[in-house]
Amino acid sequence: MQEKLFNIIKRPVVSEKSTALAEVANRYVFEVEPTATKTEIKAAVEQLFKVKVKAVNTSMMHGKNKRSGKYSYKRSNWKKAVVTLIQGQKIELFQVKQ
């Protein structure tokens, strides 16, 4: 069970929109295992980052069709989780060098 929690969260999604969500609304975006449930995601985030989670929203992101010359292919589908933390909690995703 313990190992499964660490395999649920694949990576943080870093974009302008997700960074703004983290700063303004205390919400963090992660790419997660497609079979993971909201309760599993909540438990994994609470254990990994030692924070209290208020809510978890998930959505399936469908892979885009891409082309490279005459060849076309489709990127894989992936699951996105938006995690809302309790007021006053914070996740330090990256250390800022000063």
Image: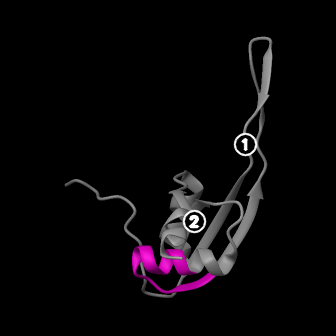
Question: Badge 1: how crowded within 10 Å, few (<14), some, or many (20+)?
Answer: few
Camera-nearest residue between 3 and 21:
3
Camera-nearest residue between 31 and 16:
31
Tell whether 35 sits left or right of 24: right
Kind of residue at badge 1: Ser
* Quarter of the C terminus within the rendering: bottom left
Whether the magenta-drawn stretch holds residue 46 is answered as: yes
Vertical arrangement, residue 66 with respect to residue 46, above or below: above
Residue reaching furthest to the top: 70
Reading the image, the residue beneath label 2 is: 8
| Distance from Cα at disc 2 to Cα at disc 1 | 17 Å
Question: What kind of element bears circle 1?
Answer: loop
Pinpoint residue 1: horizontal percent, then vertical percent: 54, 76
Pinpoint residue 35: horizontal percent, then vertical percent: 71, 64
Residues rendered magenta in the picture: 43-55
Pinpoint residue 20: horizontal percent, then vertical percent: 53, 62
Reading the image, the residue beneath label 1 is: 76
Camera-nearest residue between 67 and 27:
67
Vertical arrangement, residue 78 with respect to residue 83, above or below: above
